[in-house]
Image: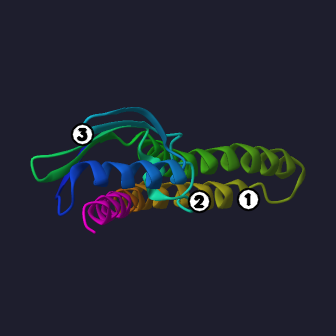
Amino acid sequence: MFEDSVPLAIDPERALDRAKSVLSATGLQIEKSGRGELSIKGPGLRSTNQNSLLAITDGRLTAGGGTLDLKADLGGLLFLQRFIRFFPPALCLFLFVVLGGTYYFAGMFAKSPHQIWTVIGVTGGQAVLWLFIGPLMSRAMSTRIKADIHRALSSLAVD
């Protein structure tokens, strides 16, 4: 659950009207619009080339008491984090199986059957490298997306 709050410098209803137009133009669906609050749903983020607001899969935007508050589930961000952490090592494992099998069977007929160690070294090294790079990239992406959402929220709260 992501929560953010910014000071409101304009009328709360005006801020919510601006939010409706910005969020719907971004691709988020306004589920419920009540007095002082918006309920929003989104398709989720599938690429870092998309607008960071699409990371919101379910959220509630409230305006009142001098603040603009957002409580949201960032399901799109969670999807991308899992993808970055698990896909590259899984791809290395797949390449190990395919290339290892190919070199193993080819090595049975060759003079030097030791080529499989090259495959093990290269694919294993890549997998180990991605086990460190994946979480770093995931954390950096999370920080950037949350900062983008905060900037968008801040721009809605001022004139």
Determine whether 65 is above or below 22 in the image.
above
Q: Secondary structure at mark 2?
A: helix
Is the magenta region chiefly helix, strand or loop? helix
Give the mark, 1 or 2, whose residue is nearer the N terminus. 1
Few, some or many C-alpha atoms within 10 Å of disc 2 (few <14, some 14-19, many ≥20)?
few
Does 45 sit left or right of 73 as displayed?
right
Determine whether 52 is above or below 71 in the image.
below
Q: Nearer the viewer, mark 1 or mark 2?
A: 2
- Residue position for label 3: 36
Span highlighted in magenta in the image: 143-159
Residue 121: numbered disc = 2
- Residue 89: give x, y in percent of width and height: 54, 49
Q: Nearer the viewer, mark 3 or mark 1?
A: 3
Residue drawn at point x = 52 percent, y = 46 percent: 83
Residue drawn at point x = 29 percent, y = 54 percent: 15
Q: Amino acid at mark 2?
A: Gly
